[in-house]
């Protein structure tokens, strides 16, 4: 429940005791919630009329036995701390030449995501993907999709030898995936029915239930195609990054709308907070999460 305190401002109740209430306040730059004695605080508290998406999606707080206070995860960072980490690598923010430069290091980078986006537009944009689906030319769809994916490597090698190429070997399952993908991309904003259809199509792929493949494939191509609308979900890593910034996206190993819609809310909120640094779209949000989590935790 969100409440309003006359002097401390907007907050979220995170725990109740017989005689006390624990509230995390919007303006707090601390890991722990504030403990208020109900008898003393009640005259200053009222149900909040305002809404706050960040507080609503805030990660769970656990009781610290030593202090008797409820706190966010020990790895939690304030927004300013996260920005400082990002600036350690890129002093000029998202306009830093190092950030924008072609990267030769392993893994993805802003440059590689932009290259993948351009490749998608060339290979499958402008109605080409839909045409290939209508023509049932699954072989060509797969070839083009793999050329796009090669820019970033959505699916990383695992001991189980999970492979995107192998996942698309079943022609019928691959066709259903691409049809669902282009249906999702056709609408102005992601919606539950289309995302769930795509998630089901991913699960039907060979290896489609593998955690290493399921979320990256369910979100990766949409993210590459429309980084203004869609966000990449990495298995567990994205959830951990969100939790580090105090947001709970409700991670589950199987792609689902509840997690994805929470991820989109988190990414859009973070994009707005990163705008002063020059962030343009969700590629920049993904890069920020990667950079702030790649060092000490």
Image (cartoon, rainbow, N blue to C red):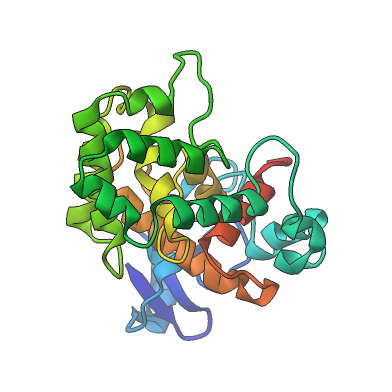
Residue 141 position in % (x across, y down): 34, 40
Name above or below for residue 121 compared with residue 217. Answer: below
Residue 153 appears in view:
yes
At x 40%, y 31%, the residue is 213
- Location of residue 235 by image quarter: top left
- Looking at the image, residue 229 sits to the left or right of residue 199; the answer is right
Q: Quadrant of residue 223?
A: bottom left
Where residue 50 sits: x, y (%)? 36, 82
* Coordinates of residue 95 in the picture (x, y in percent): 74, 68
Report the residue at 50% width, 19% height from top. 158
- Name the spot of residue 221 as percent of width and height, x first: 41, 47
Residue sitting at x 38%, y 65% = 56
Quadrant placement of the C terminus: top right
In this view of the protein, which residue sits in the foreground, 192 or 71?
A: 192
Above or below for 12 versus 161 = below
Q: Residue at x 31, y 28 (%)?
A: 208
């Amino acid at each position: 429940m969100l409440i309003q305190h006359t002097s401390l401002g907007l907050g979220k109740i995170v725990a109740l005791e017989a005689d006390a209430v624990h509230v995390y306040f919007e303006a707090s730059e601390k890991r722990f919630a504030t403990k208020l004695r109900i008898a003393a605080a009640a005259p200053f508290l009222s149900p909040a009329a305002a809404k706050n998406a960040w507080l609503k999606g805030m990660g769970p707080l656990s009781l610290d036995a030593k202090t008797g206070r409820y706190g966010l995860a020990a790895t939690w960072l304030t927004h300013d701390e996260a920005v400082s980490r990002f600036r350690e690598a890129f002093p000029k923010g998202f306009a830093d030449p190092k950030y924008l430069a072609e990267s030769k290091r392993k893994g993805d980078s802003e440059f590689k995501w932009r290259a993948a986006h351009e490749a998608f537009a060339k290979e499958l944009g402008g109605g080409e993907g839909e045409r290939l689906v209508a023509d049932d030319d699954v072989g060509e769809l797969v070839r083009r999709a793999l050329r796009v994916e090669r820019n970033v490597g959505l699916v990383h090698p695992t001991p189980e030898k999970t492979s995107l190429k192998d996942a698309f070997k079943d022609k019928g399952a691959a066709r259903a995936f691409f049809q669902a993908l282009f249906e999702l991309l056709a609408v102005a904003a992601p919606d539950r029915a289309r995302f769930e259809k795509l998630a089901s199509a991913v699960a039907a792929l060979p290896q489609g239930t593998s955690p290493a493949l399921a979320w990256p494939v369910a979100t990766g191509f949409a993210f590459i195609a429309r980084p203004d609308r869609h966000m990449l979900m990495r298995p567990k890593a994205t959830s951990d990054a969100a939790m580090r910034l105090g947001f709970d996206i409700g991670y589950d190993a199987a792609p689902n709308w509840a997690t994805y819609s929470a991820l989109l809310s988190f990414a859009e909120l973070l994009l707005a907070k990163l705008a002063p640094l020059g962030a343009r779209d969700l590629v920049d949000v993904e890069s920020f999460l990667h950079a702030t989590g790649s060092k000490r935790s």
